[in-house]
Image (cartoon, helix red, strand yellow):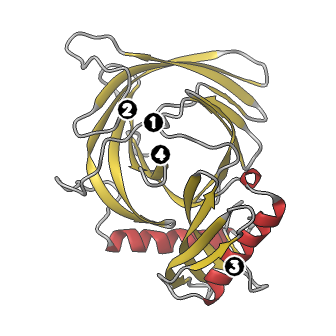
Amino acid sequence: MKIPYTSSIGYVLHVIMLSFLITVSAGCSLHGTLPQEGPELQPAGLPLYTVGTTFVYSDGTWEMVADASPGTVTWRNHRGHVSTGSPDFIQKRTYWETSKRKGERVIVRRDWPLLPDAESIWPLGKGAEYYYTEQGAWSMDGGRVRTYTYYGDAKVIGTRRVSVMAGEFDTWVIRVKRYASKKRLRETITWYYAPVVGHYVLMESKRSNPRVPSRRLELLAVIPPQGQMLPAFHEVAEKNLQQALEFSRSGVPVTWSDDVSGLSGKTTPTATFRLDTGMFCRSYEQELNLPGERKVYYGMACRDQSRGWIVPRK
């Protein structure tokens, strides 16, 4: 799906505000108390990422899976920066590099008395918890190397159904606390992992330093890898997406199929809303049926001036 560059900061802010209002109306507060009970979910294993898949977020940023192997995922983001780490997204990437900085991290299990003897928090399930130590080193423009050590604890604190830009999802809620020392809390991060997506759909971060603002990041869209289909079939899937968003009512799918290749798919709009700018946006589910594999991609697109539907991103 061809996604053009969107440079309007005001436009992205309107989208963020709309998403925030939708989420609040569904009963989700940024740092409020989570409900004691949520939807029933089966234990969830580590995410499996496919090369070429792109994840777009509510602030307009995005990152694509550049490479994937058992236990390791390499990402490239909208700035061209590369990072590599475990598919366990609650842990910081073990290698990262920007235009001016680069660094490495080592994540090890905290082997302390009385702590649960778990190698990771996966598979996610009620009561799962994991304690670890993060040791890192980084440098700027090849200068002095700086080192640090953080102590982390991760716990599954329940399940919850959340509304974000990409849709509504049943999620496992994981709370991660990072300490600069054994007693000095630095940051609390809450992840909402949706098994049906295979990725987190919401992240909320609160720093202990009151001068550092809280952060909220929603999943806006998951864009399928173009390499999964021949260009001709990719064009058919893109045309199907555009037709569904332009003409179909919410909840009514528009399908396509090819008898020779066995490929098929459909797009189902799930909601329609209008921004303060007057621009129309729709959330959707895009299903692709490839030989031996069925994938569903969730997202939100907005109608641009040329009457096409685009996923807003940097």
* First in residue order: circle 1 vs circle 4: 1
Give residue 242's position: percent from left, percent from top: 69, 79
Q: Which residue is mark 1?
A: 46
**Three-letter amino acid code at the position of disc 4:** Val
Q: Which residue is mark 4?
A: 212
Under tag 3, what secondary structure?
helix
Q: Nearer the viewer, mark 1 or mark 4?
A: 1
Q: CA distance from mark 2 to mark 4?
A: 30 Å
Q: CA distance from mark 1 to mark 4?
A: 31 Å
Observer able to see residue 105: yes
Q: Which residue is mark 2?
A: 122
* First in residue order: circle 3 vs circle 4: 4
Q: Is residue 96 above or below residue 16?
A: above
Q: Nearer the viewer, residue 228 or 259?
A: 259
Q: CA distance from mark 1 to mark 2?
A: 6 Å
**Three-letter amino acid code at the position of disc 3:** Gln
Q: CA distance from mark 3 to mark 2?
A: 38 Å
Give residue 37's position: percent from left, percent from top: 18, 54
Residue 31 picture quarter: bottom left
Placement of the C terminus among the 4 image quadrants: bottom right
**261 left or right, relative to 175:** right
Observer able to see residue 2: no
Taking the spot 57% from the left edge, 30% from the top edge, the residue there is 93
Q: Which residue is mark 3?
A: 242
